[in-house]
Amino acid sequence: MSLRMAWYPASLNSLIGLSGTHLSNSFNMAILRMNMMRTPLSRMLKTSLLLALLGGCQGSVSPYDYIPVSGQVTYEDGTPIPSGGFVLKFYALDAPKVENMRPRPAQADIDSNGNFECATSYKYGDGLIPGKHRVVIFYATDKNGKLLVPKEYIQAGDSPLIIDTADAPLEIKVPKP
């Protein structure tokens, strides 16, 4: 009968003197007993730590209320912006500071027809904080890298696009470059 256990690494067996079917001395037996006693405690500590970390993630929800929004982005003449796949970012303008937090910007992915079905702030599709938002357009370029919207619409501080969630579904119009 071998004292080498499947869970006990072979390299560690050689370090403490386990060889074949016997232990070389009582010192090695004491080390083996300590390691065997420590293993369940170690597993319990690791499991407890993992559960604590997972439990902590549940507390990281937003303190804000959200409303679902959808809409469309087109040029002022009503034609769709030719390249789908760009992104809208919504920056809340009048959201109150809650518990020393400011809301993170929401995001909406635009399809090839200029439509978006939802906006995401914290959880997929949760929507926007009620009120006004500055809208910035990201990745609105054609295959050659030419901007499909005026430059000021792609910079958070300069974008003149302001929407109000009360106007949902949102109809966002931008001039051609």
Image (cartoon, rainbow, N blue to C red):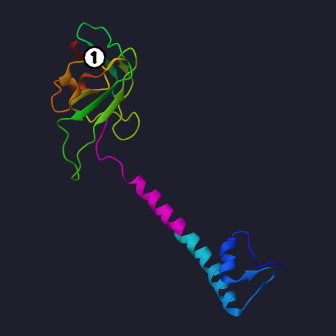
Q: Position of residue 169 (x, y in %)?
A: 31, 20
Q: Mark 1 belongs to which amino acid?
A: Leu
In this picture, is 16 found above or below 123?
Answer: below
Residue drawn 37% across and 28% down? 118
Image position, residue 149 (x, y; %): 24, 18
Q: Seen in the image, is 131 located left or right of residue 43? A: left
Quadrant of the image occupied by residue 65: top left
User: How packed is label 1: few (under 14 Cα within 10 Å), some, or many (20 or more)?
Assistant: some
- Numbered range of the magenta stretch: 46-67
Name the residue carrying label 1: 148
Which of the 4 image quadrants contains residue 88?
top left
Q: Secondary structure at mark 1?
A: loop
Task: Residue at 23% x, 10% y: name it.
Answer: 76
Residue 12 seen anywhere in this rendered image of the structure: yes
Position of residue 95 relative to residue 77, above or below, is: below
Which picture quadrant has residue 72? top left
| Magenta stretch encompasses residue 85 | no
Would you place residue 20 above or below residue 154 in this image?
A: below
Q: Residue furthest bottom?
A: 26
